[in-house]
Image (cartoon, grey):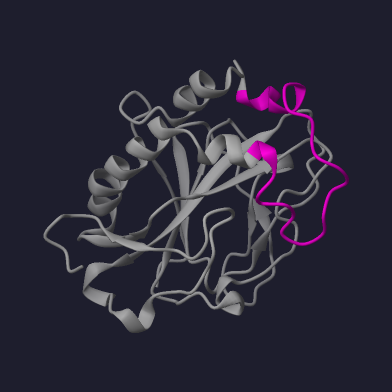
């Protein structure tokens, strides 16, 4: 099973950040906090994944179209076969001074299946201060952040590797989305995860290609 890998993608073809900037009017996504005031105090654990800020992101149709094409092309090429993928990605916002998703956890504890592969896609340049922290192998608990430039993403085994956030001590917001796929050769109804997205109910597993099983 894959542990974790940082890979790049073409931001001219898949300019997720540009689509978000155009839709929200925020010229620098790392300055998101200057345009959108957080709602109340930070909630413990997984935080508020259905805030007004999240609603703005889930409603961007251009990102939804890019996301589908991204999975059908780049992601299936990386996996090496067609996949089933969650119908919408999960949006994450880590504001300065906050955790984003703070509770360290393994996704299998929440009912996720180990067949899943997780793709974590930051839309801003990130440092260890506002990154996702992941252990190197199951049970190691040697957490480290993964600084990345826009155009890179972390592919990792979130079902089995403990991961979470530390408090963002930088002055930059980290905006990201993540999603899960299951290789078509491993998919059947019994592996479908009854997991909820942040705002849109249970995951619906879409085939990456029209000739995939319904």
Placement of the N terminus among the 4 image quadrants: bottom left
Q: Which residues are magenta?
A: 29-53
Taking the spot 50% from the left edge, 51% from the top edge, the residue there is 178
83 or 124, which is in the foreground?
Answer: 83
Taking the spot 31% from the left edge, 42% from the top edge, the residue there is 70
56 or 77, which is in the foreground?
Answer: 56
174 or 85, which is in the foreground?
Answer: 85
Q: In the picture shown, does residue 25 fall above or below 59?
A: above
> What type of secondary structure mainly makes up the magenta span?
loop
Q: In the picture shown, does residue 189 fall above or below 210?
A: below
Q: In the picture shown, does residue 119 fall above or below 169?
A: below
Occupied quadrant, residue 39: top right
Q: In the picture shown, does residue 108 fall above or below 82?
A: below
- Residue 38 rendering spot, x and y as whole percentages: 79, 36
Occupied quadrant, residue 35: top right
**On the rendered structure, is 194 left or right of 168?**
left
**On the rendered structure, is 44 left or right of 110?**
right
- Residue 43 rendering spot, x and y as whole percentages: 82, 54
- Residue 12 rendering spot, x and y as whole percentages: 34, 23
Q: Is residue 51 magenta-colored?
A: yes
Q: Residue furthest right?
A: 41
170 or 55, which is in the foreground?
Answer: 55
- Residue 135 rendering spot, x and y as whole percentages: 63, 64
**On the rendered structure, is 133 left or right of 155?**
right
Placement of the C terminus among the 4 image quadrants: bottom left
Taking the spot 57% from the left edge, 71% from the top edge, the residue there is 107
Q: Is residue 99 magenta-colored?
A: no
**On the rendered structure, is 169 left or right of 18?**
right
């Amino acid at each position: 099973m894959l542990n974790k890998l940082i890979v790049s993608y073409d931001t001219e073809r898949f300019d997720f950040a540009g689509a978000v900037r155009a839709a929200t009017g925020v010229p620098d996504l790392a300055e998101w906090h200057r345009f959108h005031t957080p709602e109340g105090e930070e909630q413990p654990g997984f935080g508020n994944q259905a805030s007004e800020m999240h609603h703005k992101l889930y409603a961007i149709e251009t990102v939804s179209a890019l996301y589908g094409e991204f999975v059908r092309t780049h992601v299936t090429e990386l996996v090496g076969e067609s996949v089933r993928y969650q119908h919408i990605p999960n949006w994450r916002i880590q504001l300065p001074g906050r955790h984003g998703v703070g509770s360290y956890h393994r996704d299998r504890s929440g009912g996720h299946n180990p067949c899943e592969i997780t793709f974590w896609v930051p839309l801003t340049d990130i440092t260890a201060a506002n990154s996702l922290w992941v252990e190197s192998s199951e049970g190691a608990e040697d957490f480290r952040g993964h600084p990345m430039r826009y155009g890179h993403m972390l592919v990792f085994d979130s079902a089995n590797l403990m991961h979470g956030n530390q408090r963002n001590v930088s002055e930059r917001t980290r905006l990201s989305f993540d999603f899960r796929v299951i290789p078509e050769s491993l998919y059947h109804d019994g592996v479908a995860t009854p997991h909820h997205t942040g705002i849109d109910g249970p995951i619906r597993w879409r085939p990456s290609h029209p000739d995939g099983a319904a």
